[in-house]
Amino acid sequence: MEDLGYYNGKYDRIENMTVPMNDRACYFGDGLFEVAYCRNRKIYALSEHMDRLYASAEALGINIPITEEEFSALIYELSAKVDSHEQIIYWQVSRGTAPRNHAPAKGMVANIWVMIRPKVLVDIYTPMKLITVEDTRFFHCNMKTLNLIPTVMASREAEMRGAEEAVFHRGDRVTECAHSNISIITDEGVVKTAPADEMILAGVARAHFINKCHELSIPVVEEPYTVSEMMAAAEVIVTSSGTLCRPACEIDGIPVGGRAPKILKSLQDGLLGDFMKETDI
C-alpha cells in the first residue's frame, strides 16, 4: 500500500477511511497522539513515545484497551503493509464513542487511530526561519492532546510569513514551538532549554538532545529564558522527531545564531548518528 489508515481494527488507504461522528475526537479533541519516524522498517524511539502516550492517558483517565506492547506490535504490523520503508507514523487515541456530552460516560474504551505515510527525515543541517507568537494555549501543554487550534493558527502564520516554525512565548518567557521544542546555546557554551513543566510538551527528541549534551560534556540548564536571550544566543536549536536538531538562522526576519558551529555540529552529528544506528538494517 502507498499509505495506510487504521481505525479500531479496520484499515485501508487513508482517503478511504472514515470515523464515527460520535467519536469524541470529532467534537472535543478529547484524545492524545504521537508521531515517530520509521527507516528500514525500524521505528525510532517507539518505546519512549508509547511511554508518554500511556502516562498521559492515565492522567486524563483515557482507557486504552490494549497494552503498550500490543500497541507497539500493532504499529509494526501496519507499518509492514506500507510500500516505502521510510515513513512518518502518526497514532492517536480518543476517549471513545458516545453521544455528545461534555462529561464523558463511565466505562468508555478508547478508539485507536493510526496513519502511515512515506516520508524521509529532513536535512537537519539546513537552518530554519522562525517567527515568534504569543502563547495563548491552556496549561496542559505537557500532554500531547488533540487540542491544537493555537498550533494551527501559529503554523499558518509562520507559513504566510515565509517561515517553517513558530516560537511560542508567554510574555517574555519562551516556552516551545508550535510543533517542536526549542533550546539555545549561550556565548559561554551552555545549553538552555525550558523546564519540563505544564508550559511545554517534554519531547522525546528533546530528551535525546539533552542526553547527547551530557554525553558530549556540554553543560545543560533546564530553566526559563527570555525572547531577548533567544535573539542574542550563539545558537537557536529546534528539536522534534522530524528535525532532531536543526538550527535557526532567522527569527522575525532578524538573523540569529551561527556563533557556536562546532558545538552545534557535534550535537547534530551525534543525534543523526544515533538515528541512523538505531534504524540500520
Image (tube, helix red, strand yellow):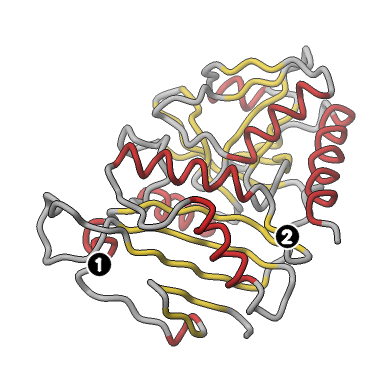
Q: Residue furthest top?
A: 188
Image-quadrant location for residue 192: top right
User: In the image, is residue 171 above or below residue 275?
Assistant: above
Q: Residue at x 72, y 23 (%)?
A: 185
Q: Residue at x 14, y 51 (%)?
A: 106
Q: Which mark is residue 23?
A: 1
- Picture coordinates of residue 22, whole percent (x, y): 19, 70
Q: Residue at x 52, y 34 (%)?
A: 202
Check whether the beta carbons of the residues at disc 1 and disc 2 lie within 8 A of each other: no
- Picture coordinates of residue 241, whole percent (x, y): 64, 49
| Left or right: 129, with 258 as reference point | left
**SS for dot 1:** loop
Count neighbours of disc 1 (C-alpha within 10 A) and say few if under 14, some if 14 to 19, many if 20 or more: many
Q: Which mark is residue 113?
A: none
User: In the image, is residue 120 above or below residue 223?
Assistant: below
Marks 1/2: CA distance?
31 Å
- Nearest the camera: 194 or 132? 194
- Picture coordinates of residue 265, whole percent (x, y): 86, 36
Image-quadrant location for residue 262: top right
- Nearest the camera: 212 or 174? 212
User: In the image, is residue 259 above or below residue 224?
Assistant: below
Q: Which mark is residue 42?
A: 2
- Type of the residue with mark 1: Asp
- Nearest the camera: 86 or 179? 86
